[in-house]
Amino acid sequence: MNRSSDKQRIHKSAQALATKLEKTKQKLKTLTKEHNRFKRRFQSLLSQSPAIIYTSKVSDDFGITFISDNVLEKLGYSPKQFLTDPSFWMNHIHPDDRERVLKDFAKVFKHSRHVHEYRFRRKDRIYRWIHDEFSLIKDKSGHPVEIIGSWMDITQQKKIEQTSLSHQANVESLRGQNFDMVKSAVDLAEARKVAEDTNKRLRTALSRVKKKNKR
């Protein structure tokens, strides 16, 4: 009798455990589907974003540890090229900008956020102006863990700014030329006035001489 009761209890316990495991499996399956759906949605949003999202190390060469897939469309390089070569990002920055960019990175440890602009060589070997905005991520103890940031291609904006500066320089040049022309015209007018006054005095003097001679 006792053996039969023990078997029934074991059987019920086994059934309950099996049911619980099945429910856990179903929940895990549902969570996995939701995670994959969220991941696909997140990647879709990143790929459609005008900005390239990235994370990087907080020391050494500040190598890229993650970069969004739209980097291929924007710059022509695959994410794998950035991830497998720690120096890939730095090696494609314009030589005249590299030293400044490295110095700028140190500022994030003081202010936790920084923005800078530099030229980056695209796969077609054309340099594009990049607006790089990034923040420092810290752990609970306040230690730097990671840098997260975004790149925006601002080449067109830079061209507009350059055109505006050139236009302004032309305007200033024209203003200078106009000033010189006005000054020359004023000088000429004054010279004419002096000449007219001189001629008038000469005519007056000659008239007096003639009158004296007639006497």
Image: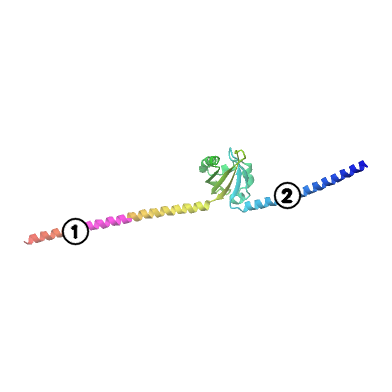
Q: Amino acid at mark 2?
A: Leu
Residue bearing the label numbered 2? 31
Per the rendered image, the range of residues in magenta is: 181-200
- Between 17 and 209, the one nearer to me in the picture: 17
Q: Residue at x 77, y 50 (%)?
A: 26
Residue 53 pos. (x, y %)? 60, 48
The answer to if 173 sits in the magenta stretch is no
Q: Residue at x 30, y 55 (%)?
A: 184
Residue 186 pos. (x, y %)? 28, 56
Q: Quadrant of residue 14?
A: top right
Is disc 1 placed on a helix, strand or loop? helix
The answer to if 190 sits in the magenta stretch is yes
Q: Which mark is residue 199?
A: 1
- Between 102 and 58, the one nearer to me in the picture: 58
Q: Main secondary structure of the magenta part?
A: helix
Q: Quadrant of the N terminus?
A: top right
Q: Earlier in the sequence, mark 2 or mark 1?
A: 2
Location of residue 91 with respect to 30 vertically, above or below: above
Q: Residues within 10 Å of mark 1 (few under 14, many from 20)?
A: few
Q: Residue at x 44, y 53 (%)?
A: 166
